[in-house]
Image (cartoon, grey):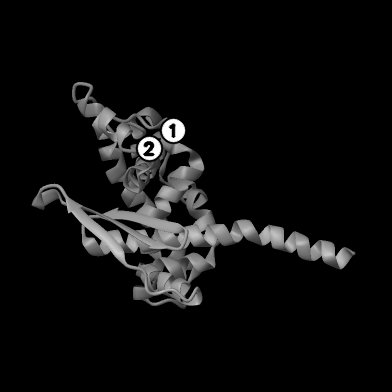
Amino acid sequence: MLELALTHRSWAYEHGAAPHNERLEFLGDSILGQAVTVKLYTEHPDLTEGELAKRRAALVSTVALAEVARGLGLGAALKLGKGEEQTGGRDKDSILADTVEAVIGAVFLSTDSVTASEFVLQLIAPLFDDPERFSEALDPKTALQKEAAARGMPHPGYDTVGTGPDHARVFTSSVQLGEVTGRGEGTSKKVAELAAARDAVTQLRQARARRAPRGARRGGNSAGR
């Protein structure tokens, strides 16, 4: 079941239309949404329906699930076709996010609904425990503009292009702020740009987090002396 969850359709098409993970992804998406919805509803009785919906969207977004996938090292274990392999498919947000959902579906079929829900909550626990994520994830473009203003830089611009036929068009977007380039993709220009902004803000936060311990150690040493 795990092997099926890690099998992308590009690999399946190159191997005689072998089974792939899209059905598991469909199942896992529902289980993920239910587990997150129940947790938000029970833990935040003060939030309105609209606020709950926005938080849920942030937690189950492609960018958030791709982050989970990278933490699990799923990219290295994927079975990809040659085309996806050559174009960096192992680190594409969309493929990684879909794989997380497929793995959740596999856990459900291999165990039971309670175990699958617990598995989901363990996966996304770091996302729940990061309060800054919600403000940035809910409005990443504004968060990025604030970052630019704090640096005395103009509002960042987005480079967005669409590819594919009209009925299955995919948009990719990139945005740069200083040394960071955020990238995202989606089925509309708006979704792709939001994903790119969210990626850039996440990178900036991670860079600050890496620098913080060094500053703290220097402060501690000075006090000691």
Q: Secondary structure at mark 1?
A: helix
**Point 48% across, 57% down: residue:** 203
Q: Secondary structure at mark 2?
A: helix
Query: Label 1: few (<14), some or many (≥20) within 10 Å?
Result: few
Q: Earlier in the sequence, mark 1 or mark 2?
A: 1
The image shows residue 64 at horizontal and vertical percentages of 42, 55
**Disc assigned to residue 90:** 2
The image shows residue 189 at horizontal and vertical percentages of 22, 61
**Disc assigned to residue 216:** none
Q: Quadrant of residue 83?
A: top left
41 sits to left or right of 13: right
Q: Is residue 90 above or below residue 159?
A: above
Q: Quadrant of residue 9?
A: top left
Q: Quadrant of residue 75?
A: top left
Q: Are marks 1 and 2 in contact (CB under 8 Å)?
A: yes
Q: Does residue 158 appear anywhere in the picture? A: yes
- Residue ID for mark 1: 76
The image shows residue 200 at horizontal and vertical percentages of 42, 60
Q: Seen from this angle, which residue lies furthest left?
A: 166
**Point 36% across, 48% down: residue:** 93
**Point 83% across, 65% down: residue:** 222
- C-alpha span from label 1 to label 2: 7 Å
Q: Amino acid at mark 2?
A: Arg
Query: Label 2: few (<14), some or many (≥20) within 10 Å?
Result: many
Q: Amino acid at mark 1?
A: Ala
Q: Is residue 186 above or below residue 95?
A: below
